[in-house]
Image (cartoon, helix red, strand yellow):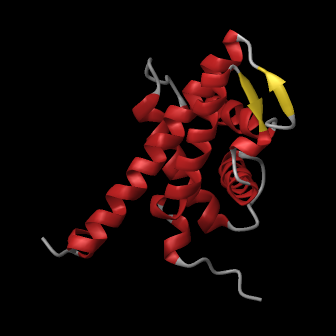
């Protein structure tokens, strides 16, 4: 079994659908003031967990099982986070702490539950972050289609 990762799996475009569908489910939950796991398709949820696990591996102790994918997902996440936070993050520790918090929110999406105002605010924050990842992925796909990503300008 090869441990190499195809270049397409380490770019934002790979996560476009996953990020967009997860964000849509979180926004739907806020609209209904309640969350149910069926708001996010099972395969999408599994892949969202995978994304956040790779991100956590990048800033965790030790060498990740797949360093290329972990580093790439971390880069995707940090770019999106910096673009969506209200106040600039002061250091890497703050950045990692916020990413860890987002990962925990997504990891804890289980069953059905009513949402309080704190939950709703957090869901909207994570949805905005995920929408930025989806937007970045769409930009990458467009650039690839028109040849900009391959030095075609």
The outermost residue toward the top is 117
Q: Position of residue 73 (x, y in %)?
A: 57, 55
How many labels sit on residues?
0
Instruction: In the rendered view, tell whether residue 30 sits above or below residue 15.
Output: above
Q: Which quadrant holds the N terminus?
A: bottom right
Q: Is residue 30 left or right of residue 116?
A: left
Is residue 7 placed above or below 112 in the rendered structure? below
Would residue 29 be seen by someone viewing this image from the given angle? Answer: yes
- Residue 14 is left or right of residue 102, and the answer is left
Give percent across and percent down for residue 56. Answer: 71, 47
Residue 94 in view here: no
Tell me which residue sits at (42%, 57%) in the image: 137
Going by the picture, which residue comes out furthest to the left?
153
Which residue appears at 44% of the width and 19% of the height? 86
Q: Quadrant of residue 132?
A: top left
Does residue 100 sit above or below 47 in this rendering?
above
Name the residue at 66% across, 23% down.
32
Q: Percent from the top left, x then y, of residue 64?
A: 74, 61
Quadrant where the C terminus sits is bottom left
Front residue of 142/115: it is 115
Compare residues 141 and 24 and report the one nearer the observer.
Answer: 24
Residue furthest to the front? 32
The image quadrant of residue 68 is: bottom right
Whether residue 146 sits left or right of residue 50 in the image: it is left
Residue at x 74%, y 60% (from the top left corner): 63
Above or below, comparing residue 140 to residue 144 in the picture: above
């Amino acid at each position: 079994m090869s441990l190499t990762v195809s270049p397409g799996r380490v770019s934002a475009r790979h996560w476009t659908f996953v990020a967009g569908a997860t964000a849509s489910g979180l926004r739907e939950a806020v609209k209904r003031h309640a969350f149910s796991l069926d708001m996010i398709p099972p395969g999408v949820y599994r892949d969202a967990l995978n994304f956040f696990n790779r991100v956590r591996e990048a800033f965790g102790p030790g060498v990740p099982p797949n360093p290329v994918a972990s580093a790439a997902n971390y880069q995707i996440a940090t770019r999106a986070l910096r673009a969506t936070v209200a106040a600039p993050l002061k250091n890497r520790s703050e950045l990692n702490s916020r990413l860890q918090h987002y990962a925990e929110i997504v990891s804890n999406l289980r069953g059905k539950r009513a949402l309080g105002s704190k939950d709703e605010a957090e869901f909207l924050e994570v949805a905005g972050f995920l929408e930025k990842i989806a937007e970045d992925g769409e930009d990458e796909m467009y650039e690839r289609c028109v040849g900009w990503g391959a030095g075609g300008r």
